[in-house]
Amino acid sequence: MNNYSELLEKELLSYIPGAHPLTATLTKSMIYSLTAGGKRIRPMLAFEFAKLCGGCIENVMPFACAVEMIHTYSLIHDDLPCMDNDDLRRGKPTNHKVFGEAAALLGGSGLLTLAFETVLSEKAVKRNGYEKCVLAGRVLAECAGVDGMLGGQIIDLESENKSVTAEHLQIMDDKKTGALITAACLMGCISAGADQEQMNAARNYAANIGLVFQIVDDILDVTSSTEALGKPVGSDRENHKSTYVSLLGIEQCRAIANEKTNLAVESLSAFGGDTAALADFAVYLRDRNK
Amino acid sequence: MNNYSELLEKELLSYIPGAHPLTATLTKSMIYSLTAGGKRIRPMLAFEFAKLCGGCIENVMPFACAVEMIHTYSLIHDDLPCMDNDDLRRGKPTNHKVFGEAAALLGGSGLLTLAFETVLSEKAVKRNGYEKCVLAGRVLAECAGVDGMLGGQIIDLESENKSVTAEHLQIMDDKKTGALITAACLMGCISAGADQEQMNAARNYAANIGLVFQIVDDILDVTSSTEALGKPVGSDRENHKSTYVSLLGIEQCRAIANEKTNLAVESLSAFGGDTAALADFAVYLRDRNK
């Protein structure tokens, strides 16, 4: 989508505190997961929306770093034994497999805390001013909290081994995945001083691509092969998990993915500038085969 | 120290998001620990420093709530099986004993996230303005993060079953306990628009009472009885834990506690107003027998 990844990788690490030698394990745990090969989708969305609203990459950078820190913390905690108990993430040992559960717990909380330190840092204020830093931090906290990502995680936990409706799935995914994507898009807008109409449009775009992402995940779990996907397929059915596909069938899922992708692309008409990258990204999420 | 506890209890709960019915377990987990009988020392310190610098309780209230949320989250996560594995906290079952490990993990992260949502809330901005909310949130993140509380927790973890020096203990305690006490005092000052000299004095006060608190804890573990203390004594020796008492002896510990208490009280001379409550509190921490 854009080519700021070198800048991003450099700035991401610049926020890790110098830290006392006695706390080295904690910073190592944080850096391990922060540099474990994430696709940086959320920062890229923040960059694109900032550009679209007339902002610049340098200003939105701390906000983009913060949303990636939140995403990374959520993966560390999600992988813990008391949650999904995963040993591998992106082909590498999960954080607690390397550093132990306690350091993984603290490392995750360290990244969550660092996200807010970053949004409110001197660097962020110098580039964006106090008001935008408050608004960005508020959006991030709301989208990462009870009404957002953490809410989605508790719904997910309590839905295990239960039959649920498609509406239930959508509420869960809107919070679990959609909320942080929304935060990324909105923080881009905020950094650039977007107006309310643009903010609403960004919200629409985020909600629609978030849902498409999840529906396509469910479709690929049925239609793809382990080789193509790079992870085991058929796991949802094996785990008797309700998915959009099991509830609605593949054809209806494809129709919904189409409809939501169109809505995402249409929402971009609220912006004057070049929306091609964001439109392409929405279509890519629908058409991807892995 | 002051009588704002009713106001505090009411406002603390007001920040818990309305939340979707499907996320009720998460909000219940957060409320359970938030109302489990904490002594509210950190909010009270924020109130006192705000008053001392000419501020008002209403303005500092969101900051005071936020620091208590951080303190509460740290207790929930500290009690988890992968950390201290405690079944009881203040005579009640710990959060994970009631809600399970996963909901305790999420509830703790929910409070950590909510702390920043609170500092950056519309209510906080209306009362304090954007700049003070940024400065307060920044102090809170720094003091709760790698260079503060979380750093202290990793040092504590890695010090288990090791002989360490008194200097090592002090670095650990400064971070683990002192940092959040510092945040509370500084956020009080920030809300009231204190100057740099006052901020430095608040830092001194906080560092000194934090250390006295820890030294007296170690003394009471040797000199008190289980009845007087309300918790088992002698546990440090049983666990072969290095403490200020085991490293320096009781007499030197008492001398240090005295010296640090005097320094805390002296630091209050930077403030013009009535410092009696804060001076009394420092002396109380030194002289307490439980």
Image (cartoon, coloured by chain):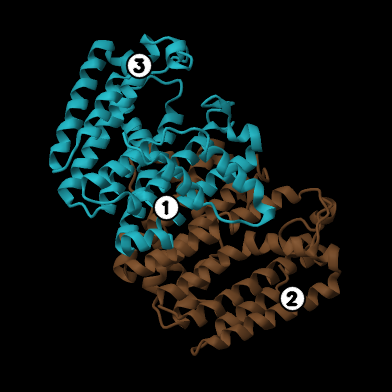
Chain colours: A cyan, B brown
Q: Check disc 2 and give the amino acid type.
A: Ala
Q: Which residue is mark 1?
A: B114
Element under disc 3: loop
Element under disc 2: helix
Q: Residues within 10 Å of mark 3 (few under 14, many from 20)?
A: some
Q: Quadrant of residue B138?
A: bottom left
Chain letter for the residue marked with disc 1 in the picture: B
Which residue occupies the extreme bottom position in the image?
Answer: B272
Residue at 18% from the left image edge and 46% from the top image edge: A198
Element under disc 1: helix
Q: Residues within 10 Å of mark 2 (few under 14, many from 20)?
A: many
Residue B268: percent from the left, percent from the top?
A: 57, 84
Camera-nearest residue between B234 and A254: A254
Q: Quadrant of residue A18?
A: bottom right
- Label 1, label 2: how many angstroms apart (C-alpha)? 35 Å
Q: Check disc 1 and give the amino acid type.
A: Leu
User: Is residue A145 at all visible to an observer of this figure?
Assistant: no
Which of discs 1 and 3 lies nearer the camera? The answer is: 3
Residue B124: percent from the left, percent from the top?
A: 34, 65
Residue B217: percent from the left, percent from the top?
A: 73, 65
Compared to A140, does B247 lie above or below?
A: below
Query: Going by the image, does B151 lie left or right of B19?
Result: right
Q: Which residue is mark 2?
A: B257
Which of discs 2 and 3 lies nearer the camera? The answer is: 3
Residue at 28% from the left image edge and 24% from the top image edge: A284
Residue at 68% from the left image edge and 79% from the top image edge: B261
**Position of the N terminus of chain A by quadrant:** top left
Q: Which residue is mark 3?
A: A289
**Position of the C terminus of chain A by quadrant:** top left
Q: Residues within 10 Å of mark 1 (few under 14, many from 20)?
A: many
- Mark drawn on residue A83: none
The answer to whether mark 2 and mark 3 are in CB contact below 8 A is: no
